[in-house]
Image: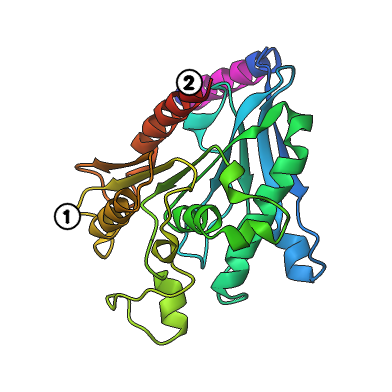
Amino acid sequence: MYFRLLNLIVGVMLGVLSGFSSSPYVTDLNIPFSQKQDSLSQHRLKLDIHHHTDAKDLPVIVWFHGGGLTGGQKFIPAELMDRGYVVVAPNYRLIPDVSVTECIDDAAEAVNWVINNISQYGGDPSKIFVAGHSAGGFLTSMIGLDKNRLEKYGVDADSLAGLIPYSGQVITHFSDRKSQGIGELTPWIDRNAPIFYVRKDAPPYIIITGDAEQELYGRYEENLYMWRMMCLTGHPDVKIFKLDGYNHGDMAVPAHHILLHEIDRILSQSE
């Protein structure tokens, strides 16, 4: 009984103190971003924005969640909050309700919305970095490397400040392969594979993976090949980081440190 009462008192005190919080950051939830009119899109295609209430022209991080393109929900990573960035977390429709092409299109439409609206939330549309974990990393690479995806919305993918995929597929995504009857361990590259769009004039491209022995399905080696091909094509700013000791799921949290460091580096070089 004593401990229950103590916990209750502490909870009340924390609640009172939170009411006096002077943080200049707020999070706006469930903002619609799509022009699609079907019921699934109207329900699913919304985003959250974590932003400073007074600052202007801040760098922007668009963060796509993982989940194998078949699950997952938008969220703002705690490690990216209150750090001098506007952070945007969009949802996208999922397989099997839609195809992988439609998942990619949702991601492109979300980035288009951010470019056109983020100044209202203190963000600089010329400093937009796209990132995401796993399926989110796949979407990051697809919309940043295949210029047709954003071009549909009148956006030049090369206007993005940087692409930072965490442990994303660069061959055809395994959920896409499964829908075609292709096994998870069968290498496959088609026009829905980021590595199909290797090019030297893409935005800065920072690849982060987990441990080679603990990642999914050779994900590190897959991304290492992507890094090598981007280098060979002459891309001037491509890097790969391997987080030893971290598996596919655990690697995201330590990767945020690399994300923030690389954003600062890229911005400092553009000044």
Tell me: residue 20, above or below residue 186.
above
How packed mark 2 is, by other alpha carbons closer than 10 Å (few <14, some 14-19, many 20 or more), is few
Residue 216 left/right relative to 197: left
Residue 163 left/right relative to 14: left
The residue shown at (62%, 76%) is 97
Amino acid type of the residue tagged 2 in the rendering: Ser
Residue interval drawn in magenta: 4-15
Residue 1 visible in the snapshot: no
Q: Residue furthest left?
A: 213
Q: Are marks 2 and 1 in contact (CB under 8 Å)?
A: no
Q: Nearer the viewer, residue 268 or 102?
A: 268
The residue shown at (70%, 62%) is 152
Kindly identify which numbered label has been placed on residue 213.
1
Picture quadrant of residue 196: bottom left
Q: Does the magenta stretch include residue 10?
A: yes
Residue 237 visible in the snapshot: yes
Residue 55 left/right relative to 186: right
The residue shown at (27%, 52%) is 228
Q: Badge 2 is on which residue? A: 268
Amino acid type of the residue tagged 1 in the rendering: Glu
Tell me: residue 250, above or below residue 184.
above
Q: Does the magenta stretch include residue 49?
A: no
Whole-percent x, y for residue 244 in the image: 20, 42
The residue shown at (35%, 76%) is 188
Residue mark closest to the camera, 2 vs 1: 2
Whole-percent x, y for residue 82 in the image: 57, 22
Give the main secondary structure, helix, strand or loop, of the magenta stretch: helix
Picture quadrant of residue 226: bottom left
Residue 210 left/right relative to 100: left
Element under disc 1: loop
Kindly identify which numbered label has been placed on residue 157.
none
